[in-house]
Image (tube, grey):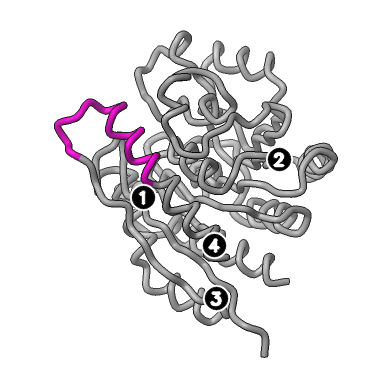
Amino acid sequence: MPEARQLRLINWPFHNGLSGISMGAGAARMAHDAELRRSLDALGWRVAYEEIEPVEVSAPEVTRVIELVRRLAMRVASAMSAGALPLVLAGNCNSSLGTVAGAGATELGVVWFDAHADFDDPDENTSGFFDVMGLAMLTGRGWDALRKTVPGHAAIPEENVVLAGVRDLEPYQWRTLERSNVGAVPGDVDPREFESALDELGSRVSRVYLHVDLDSIDSAEGRANEYAAAGGPSVDRLLECVRLVCERFAVGAAAITAYDPTFDPDGRVLGAARRVVEQIVTSLHD
């Protein structure tokens, strides 16, 4: 009987650098979900659980977030060294900076599912929301000095990013995305366009970071958070896309993000999150 594969389930339960609130509460709920744990055991994975410890709440927001990102980078790197797949359950998407740094950014591609681009840099951003800068920072835009304090950080070339499900953007955000080299597959994620984008990505990299913001799902199927939007993929289409990614690439690390239980009273989005995790680990087993 083959040895069970190792999965390092890393809980990053933070929203704006504060523990256990809003989308941070959702990360904790996913991490402690008994049904998800049972499913992973049944699928033959040896699961180790870790939680990133909080930082001093009196520190400024950006200081808090970047320190939490540094801590995450070290935990992901430790999981990689142990031969385990790092699966990060995170509040905010800017956690990706730590996950990718820990997984090793060299020759790594990114497949990112999100209703939003998270592609603002500080000079163009109008909301003041640090989390909408996650993908921009990952690709080397903005906060240059701070990014370089994250152990293992290196920018991912824009052309090595596929952004799927994107749709809820301000006009300036569309313009920035259209000027970039990011491979966008917008809206409900046309299967042929998505496969073509993966083919293009596969010509440059064989290994990816898989990022699933749960508000990528069409809001008619469940509201992951206050930013959920119509016009996205169904859960079934998202799962099929995840399967295609896992079959075509080695997954260096994965993350499920942006779940706020306040907006999910019937648990539909939590159920979708379980299915996404199960799809990832089942595809990798196959």
Q: CA distance from mark 3 to mark 4?
A: 12 Å
Read off the residue under disc 3. 45
Inspect the image, locate mark 4, and give the three-letter code of the amino acid beneath it.
Val
Label drawn at residue 21: none
The number of numbered discs placed on residues in the rendered structure image is: 4
Inspect the image, locate mark 1, and give the three-letter code of the amino acid beneath it.
Trp
Q: Is residue 152 above or below residue 29?
A: above
Q: Which residues are magenta?
A: 56-71
Q: Nearer the viewer, residue 151 or 181?
A: 151
Please report the residue visible at 63 percent of the width from the left and 45 percent of the height from the top: 233
Q: Is residue 7 above or below residue 201?
A: below
Q: CA distance from mark 1 to mark 4?
A: 16 Å
Please report the residue visible at 59 percent of the width from the left and 44 percent of the height from the top: 104
Image quadrant for the N terminus?
bottom right
Magenta region, main secondary structure: helix
In the displayed structure image, the side of residue 218 where residue 263 appears, left or right: left
Read off the residue under disc 2. 107
Q: Quadrant of residue 177 in the image?
A: top right
Q: Nearer the viewer, residue 239 or 155?
A: 155
Inspect the image, locate mark 2, and give the three-letter code of the amino acid beneath it.
Glu
Q: Is residue 36 above or below residue 150?
A: below
Image position, residue 270 (x, y; %): 43, 59
Read off the residue under disc 1. 12
